[in-house]
Amino acid sequence: HNTRPFLHRPTEISDFSVELDQQIVTMRYLTQCLVFVSLLYSSSAQATDFDYDCSGLPESFLYWWACGSYGICRGGRYSQIDCVNGTSYDRRAGDCVPNSQAVTYPCNSVPDDCLIYSGPGHRYPDRNTDPVEALPTCTFYFTCAYGRYLGHQRCPEGTVYDEAQQRCLPAPQVSPPCGTLIGNGGGPFQGNDFSEGRQVNMI
């Protein structure tokens, strides 16, 4: 039994070719989109000024702490440790401990400033005497938002927190009660910004 070979008519071949070309163009476009998204993601993953930078900091440097977690530098890298299973952070232990043992301020209470602050975010100097290291008042500051306490951070050594400027500065450049500055200091501060535990040159 002889069968005739199946042949596409010229119009069918032309239509198939056009459709194939369109599919190729579409695939190339999607590939380019994926490459662009990949590059965009990788660039956004680069370190920014808002990232916690552990370079030059001592081992086990405590970047910040809250009752449910803390940020620490280990091996030159930043890590956030979350307290789970009924534990809270305790500065004396330097780790998460059972809630019944986490009695170090402020994890045994909420700062009054946070209870009365209803805005989106503000930082206050901690004017309480440090119960762990006996550091000067205003060495630490804490963040409040919408009536909630979000965590404590420590200013670099030799600085205190200036609530008005929302950053850490040397005590002679901060008004009492946290600093020793008398008067307004002659206008905006020009020098070094020690906010976020980092020193950033100001122009």
Image (cartoon, rainbow, N blue to C red):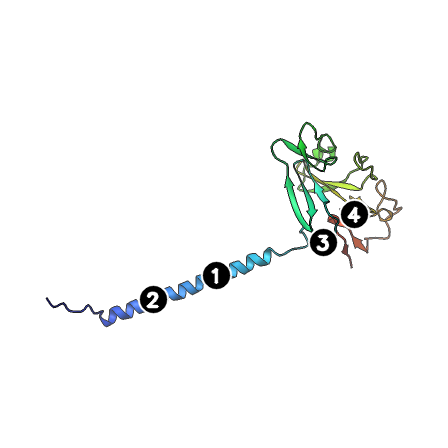
The residue to which callout 2 is attached is 20
Q: CA distance from mark 2 to mark 3?
A: 54 Å
For residue 156, the mark is: 4
The disc, 4 or 3, on the residue closer to the chain's N-terminal end is: 3
The residue to which callout 3 is attached is 55
The residue that appears at 66% across and 55% down in the rendered structure is 48
Circles 4 and 3: CB distance less than 8 Å? no
Q: CA distance from mark 4 to mark 3?
A: 14 Å
The disc, 2 or 4, on the residue closer to the chain's N-terminal end is: 2
| Amino acid type at mark 4 | Pro
The residue to which callout 1 is attached is 33
Q: Is residue 35 above or below residue 104?
A: below
Q: Residues within 10 Å of mark 1 (few under 14, many from 20)?
A: few
Q: Is residue 89 above or below residue 37?
A: above
* Residue 52 visible here: no
Farthest residue to the bottom: give it. 10
Q: CA distance from mark 3 to mark 1?
A: 35 Å
Q: CA distance from mark 4 to mark 1?
A: 45 Å
Q: Is residue 56 above or below residue 62?
A: below
* Apparent side of residue 80 relative to residue 10 in the rendered image (left or right): right
Which of the image's four quarters has the N terminus? bottom left
Q: Secondary structure at mark 4?
A: loop
Report the mark closest to the observer, 2 or 3. 3
| Amino acid type at mark 3 | Ser
Q: CA distance from mark 2 to mark 4?
A: 64 Å
Q: Residues within 10 Å of mark 2 (few under 14, many from 20)?
A: few
Q: Secondary structure at mark 2?
A: helix
* Apparent side of residue 84 relative to residue 181 in the rendered image (left or right): left
**Image quarter of residue 71:** top right
Q: CA distance from mark 1 to mark 2?
A: 20 Å
**Front residue of this view, candidates 164 and 197:** 197
The residue that appears at 64% across and 36% down in the rendered structure is 83
